[in-house]
Image: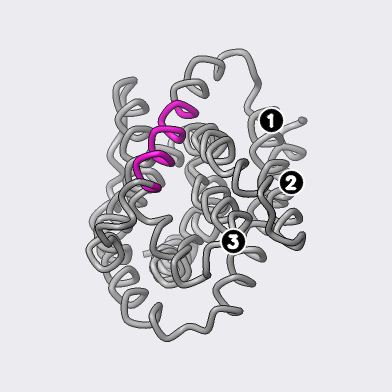
Amino acid sequence: MPFDLILLVAAIGLGAMLQVGIGIGFSIIVGPLMFLQIGTQAAVPLLLMLNVVVSVIAVPSTVRPTDWPIIKSAAIACVLGILAGIAIYPLFSEAMILTIAGGLLVIGALSTVLPASAAGKRAFLPICGLSGLATVWAATPGPLMALGLILSDYPAAIVRKLVQPIALIGYFVAFVLHAIDGFDMDPLLPAFLGATVLGSFAGRWIGPSLPRQIITSGIRGVSMLAGLVLIYRAVTLGG
């Protein structure tokens, strides 16, 4: 296997571990390499499919009965954002879409350094709707969902758990909508799936032992990195 593909498989394993361990990270770690190697159009549905696998493995260890009301509301807002994203997608160039998605992530990351407030709690569902846009456009919903939960003053340990079922619904709906238009199966899909599964179970093992500050800082840092990567990608496309 060529070195660049070995690097991609390793990134998939690391991204899956981060996604389950702190709540986000898969698309941010894997996306840039995959975009460069197979192109954005082919990478987005593949990222969505692998993200579904990550979330399916993560959810059984996270959901409590008391969590379902917030999960339901957030998932509905995310799906509405996905549908809106699909509807307006033809109006924008790829560079514009990546710039908008990246800008949302950077602004969201910066906003988490502000004290939690009632305004932050009210902003949670709109942020979930915006995460739906990011899902269908760039396969990066997790950071916005997690940032919205942090702004709502949820503890870090709860954030890493709540984001998983919300993301699962968002990823699945977005993947189905992309697959309707056709989805080419990559010949290395078995290797990608294997790395995803192994990394996800590693994340389930390390996640509960991570201190709150590491989870919060990880979410903030990964979100900022994701936003900058998307903006950089837009600039290279001529955005």
Three-letter code for the amino acid on which mark 1 is drawn: Ala
For the residue marked with disc 3, what is the amino acid? Asp
Residue 11 locus on image (x, y percent): 46, 66
Q: Position of residue 130 (x, y in %)?
A: 57, 35
Q: Which residue is mark 2?
A: 232
Question: Going by the image, does 144 lie left or right of 3?
Answer: right
Residue at 30 percent across and 65 percent down: it is 62
Of the numbered discs 1 and 2, the one sitting upstream in the chain is 1
Q: In the rendered structure, find residue 95 and report the number of the disc placed on it.
A: 1
Q: Position of residue 204 (x, y in %)?
A: 32, 75
Residue extending furthest front? 118
What distance separates the C-alpha of mark 3 from that of mark 1? 33 Å
How many C-alpha atoms fall within 10 Å of the one at disc 3: few (<14), some, or many (≥20)?
Answer: some
Q: CA distance from mark 1 to mark 2?
A: 10 Å
Callout 2: few (<14), some (14-19), or many (20+) C-alpha neighbours within 10 Å? some
Residue bounds of the magenta highlight:
70-82
Q: Earlier in the sequence, mark 3 or mark 1?
A: 1
2 or 3: tag closer to the N-terminus = 3
Q: Which residue bears the numbered disc 3?
A: 153
Residue 8: percent from left, percent from top: 45, 61
The nearer-to-camera label among 2 and 3 is 3
The part of the image, by quadrant, that contains residue 67 is bottom left
